[in-house]
Amino acid sequence: MSDATPPLAAVIGWPIGHSKSPRVHQFWLRKYGLCGYYIPIGLRPENFEAGIRALPRLGFAGANITLPYKEAVLHLASSVSDRAALIGAANTISFRPDGSFHADNTDGYGFIENLRQGAPDWDPRAGPALVLGAGGASRAVVSALLKAGVPELRIANRTRQRAQNIAEAYGARVTVVDWNAISQAVAGARTIVNTTSLGMTGQPPLNISLQHAHAEALVTDIVYQPLITPLLDQARARGLRIVDGLGMLLHQAVPGFHHWFGVRPEVDEELRRAVLAP
Ligand code: ATR
């Protein structure tokens, strides 16, 4: 028998019980017949650094990093991708043989790939984007939309200062819109994105009217519980194109899986079903 440990990977956060990532990676490991394991590891804040440092010695190739450590992990990384540095957070780390690690952020990649798969004729350059929310997820979405070529990006957030901070960090194409004026800011937007937690099961819906939406607008939500949020429901009723948020979670997992287990996995309907199963 070989002494080599099969590749190991993890998702690290606190708490961690709710994470869907193990389902995603285990589905792919089975699908591609690979020998490897992907497990959830809950690390309390006082154990975070020691826990991360121990992983390569235990045979881990890498990990996904989730709340509340996406920012903190950057301080432990020996190298950080440009996109993770720009966003100020990482969700994917890969260990080197010496135990140091590279930190990357694939959330923006996952966001864009989800739109490209769910709406193949979506063209980010067709017109302005409207982004609602200015938290961690918003930073990844904003940087990905700018990189994809949106000519103008409007951002609104309940706490205006956070939207202003993003506008300052991302430059001239980004303008701040008042939270009370989001229904007006819809006019002319070709990509409309909710990155707030509004619309999630147990949360109030996002209060927005799509009455002035462009007929060709694409509406998407990063909330995927429920899959069809009130925002997507309203958009669909108006005949607009919609893409739900589950695919962002699935696509952001692709680069890590590829790196750790050596196969570039596919995001398909079967994976969606496996992740949504009760
Ligand atoms: P994440 O990193 O997942 O984006 P976050 O940093 O907590 O999470 O951000 C949550 C987003 O949802 C923020 O834009 C937040 O607005 P504030 O910056 O004003 O807190 C937004 N949000 C949450 N609850 C909200 C509510 N009831 N009304 C409006 N916006 C809300």
Image (cartoon, rainbow, N blue to C red):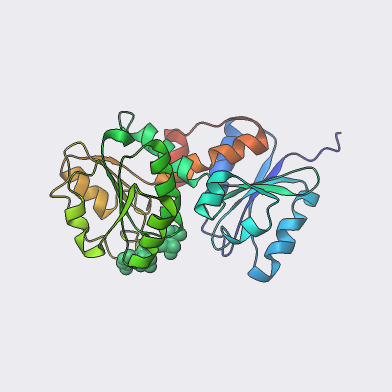
Residue nearest the observer in this picture, 113 or 225: 113
Please identify the quadrant where the N terminus is shown. top right
Q: Is residue 278 left or right of residue 188?
A: right
Which residue is painted at 57% across and 32% down in the image?
A: 31
Q: How many discs mark residues in the rendered view?
A: 0
The answer to whether residue 32 is left or right of residue 116 is: right
Q: Residue at point 42% right, 60% down?
A: 135
In front of the other: 248 or 150: 150
Residue 207 at least partly seen: yes
Q: Is residue 143 above or below residue 49?
A: above
Residue 190 versus residue 248: which sits nearer the camera? 190
State the image coordinates of residue 267 (x, y, percent, origin top left).
47, 34
Where does ligand 1 appear, by image quarter? Answer: bottom left
* x then y, percent, for residue 8: 70, 44
Quadrant of residue 199 in the image? bottom left
- Residue at 66%, 35% (x, y): give it: 261
Q: Residue at x 55, y 56 (%)?
A: 66
Say whether residue 29 is visible.
no
Q: Quadrant of residue 159?
A: bottom left
Q: Residue furthest left?
A: 211
Residue 202: % across, % down: 34, 65
Q: Nearer the viewer, residue 255 or 2?
A: 255
- Residue 50 is left or right of residue 93, and the answer is right
